[in-house]
Structures are given as C-alpha cells and as structure tokens.
Image (cartoon, rainbow, N blue to C red):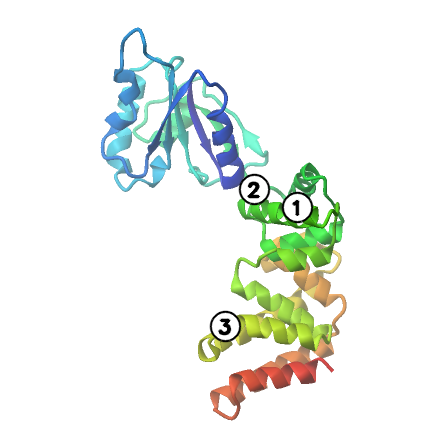
Amino acid sequence: MLKLIHGDNYYISHKKLSELKKLSKEVEYNVIDGDTINDTAEIFISEQSYGMFKTSTVTIVKRFFKNPKKISLEKKIIEKLSKSDLSSIELVFWEDSNIYGKKKKSKAKTTTSKKPRATSKLDTYLKNNAKIEEYINLSEVQLKEWIKSELSKYGISASSEAINSIIQRVGVDQSILDEELNKLSLFLNSESRKELKKEDVEFITTYYQKEFQIWDLTDAFFNKDQKKAMEILDAILINPARDFPMIIGAVLKQIKTIYLVGKFKNDSMTGMSKLRLPPFMYYKAESLSRKISKEMLKLMYRKFIDLDYSIKQGKIDVKLGLDLLIMTLSR
C-alpha cells in the first residue's frame, strides 16, 4: 500500500492518520519526520530487516514536502519505489496541507492512476501511483452540523444562535473548536445542564486573536452596556501606548465592516465572497448591522477618529479618553 493523506483540513487529515495507526495491533508503525531527514534510507529502513521474526511494518512519513532538501531526496525515493512491488509496500506520506494547491468539490477523494508516468517529482509520482486521500475544509453548513454532532456526543443540545456564537468567537479551525467544545461540555456537565446557551459560549470560550475581543467591545458600545465595555477594555488595554493603536485600528475596521455587510443582508454567501470575510467575522458584523443605523455608525466612526487625534496630540490620556468615549456612546 502506497498512500498519500493530505489536504487543507488539518483536523480531519490528522484524525485519519491517527485512525490508521489504530487499525491493527499486529502491525508496527514506524513514524518518520520527513521534514528533517537527510537520507532516504531512513524511509526504507524497515525493508532492510529480514528473518522469521520480522513483523509487518507500516512506515509513515510526515511532512516530507516541507523538507528543505526535498528536491535532492525525492528522485532517490522515486527510484526506490519504481524498483519495488507497490502492492506489497507499506508506505504512507502524510502532509498537513494540500500539496497540489487545488481545492476539490468533494470532502475526500481517493484516486489511483491506471497508467503511471515517469517523473522526477514525488507529488506527481504519488498522484499516478498512490492511493490519495484529500481532505478539504468544511463548508459553513457542514461546520455547523459538525459542531452540533460533536456537542450531541456529550449529550448537549445547542440552538443555531449558540452555534453561530461559537464560530464567531473561536473561528473555523476544527482543532481549536474541538478543544472549546470539550470545555463547554465540562462546564455544562458540572452544572448538570444539557442545553447550551449563548451566554455559556461568551463565558467559556476563548478568542484566539486579540482583535476579535474588540467585537465584544463594539457590541457593548451599541448595546449601551457600559459595565461590559469597561471590563473588556481593562482586559485588552494592558499597555496603553502599545495597545491603543491596535484597538483604535480594529474598531474603525469593524465599523467599516458592519457598514459594508449591511449591504448584503439577504445574501450572506455573496457578502462573504466579495468582502473576503470568514463566517465567524461576517455573522458577527451582520448581527450588529441589523440593529445599528448608518447614522449611528457614522457618529461612532467620527468620535473614534476625534479621540485618536486628541490622544496623538497629547490632549488626553488614552485610558481616560476611552472611558469617556464609552460613557458618551453608551448613553
């Protein structure tokens, strides 16, 4: 078996690799860090063992296509494979990305070429001769269904609003989502609850980019929630001189995003495509655009511009200026 497991969806491809290693207790697995090897003999070392006590061995080569010496090594690998009986060889290449750089329509595609062609490129050789499993990122609908399914494994039910909130806060990376869903399940189980609420998501899940925390700050402004706005500001404004430029830049960007998203209220897919926004960011902006007028957006934008100018001119302290702005915009 000569196999290639790869794709943009790291979570699923890595899960498939883990499942492969658990298929049989009778098989020994030899895992090689392909991105650091200097000699192809490290890949084929298991074939050099002979004797009546030899066990069945599957060699797994991880991230070979990230090896800086790939060009000089792949020709030797192809030469070795060309002289081998591919039906009896047990070799798996695993990559944490799509080595062909093309998106496929199906979630996973398995192919085996009928007419191998001579080549000096390992990726081409594998395409012609190996069993290929490619895993792509889930669509928006598939991701929501996956979250719902994973929560159900913990005996937890979740509304569409709660699921949307998870994606908005955490993102679309399934590896990170998996960890956050586990945290949510532990929290609900500790309280003997089975229904996930949006408030639970906001309380438990973690933002994985500091800029995304500012969405909560923006949300607090428009909801006139001074207490929450102050709490978020205290959490993200650690070093005023360093953090303020990031905060002001992110807020202004978010206001602009809310304004633009408002033009695609009835066509989210077109909006995400044209604005190049990930689902979690798009839906956060969309939820705000539905309850905020253009006049309010313009007012908030102008006030932040004025505050930025005053701080840069040394007319007001960063923390004091933001606190005052929170108080005036939240009235």
Which secondary structure lies at badge 2? loop
Label 2 and label 1: CA atoms lie apart by 24 Å
Q: Nearer the viewer, residue 229 or 167?
A: 229
Q: Which mark is residue 185?
A: 1
At 62% from the left and 46% from the top, the residue drawn is 181
| Name of the residue lying farthest toward the bottom | 315
Q: Amino acid at mark 1?
A: Ser
Position of residue 161 relative to residue 85, above or below, is: below
> Which of the 4 quarters of the picture holds residue 326?
bottom right
At 59% from the left and 36% from the top, the residue drawn is 105
Q: Amino acid at mark 3?
A: Met
Badge 2: how crowded within 10 Å, few (<14), some, or many (20+)? some
Q: Of label 3 and label 2, which has the lower sequence position? A: 2
> Which of the 4 quarters of the picture holds residue 48?
top left
Which secondary structure lies at badge 1? helix
Image coordinates for residue 154, horizontal then vertical, percent: 68, 39
Badge 1: how crowded within 10 Å, few (<14), some, or many (20+)? many
Give the residue number, with chain letter if any, for mark 2: 137
Image coordinates for residue 86, horizontal then vertical, percent: 37, 16
> Which of the 4 quarters of the picture holds residue 128?
top left
Label 3 and label 1: CA atoms lie apart by 33 Å
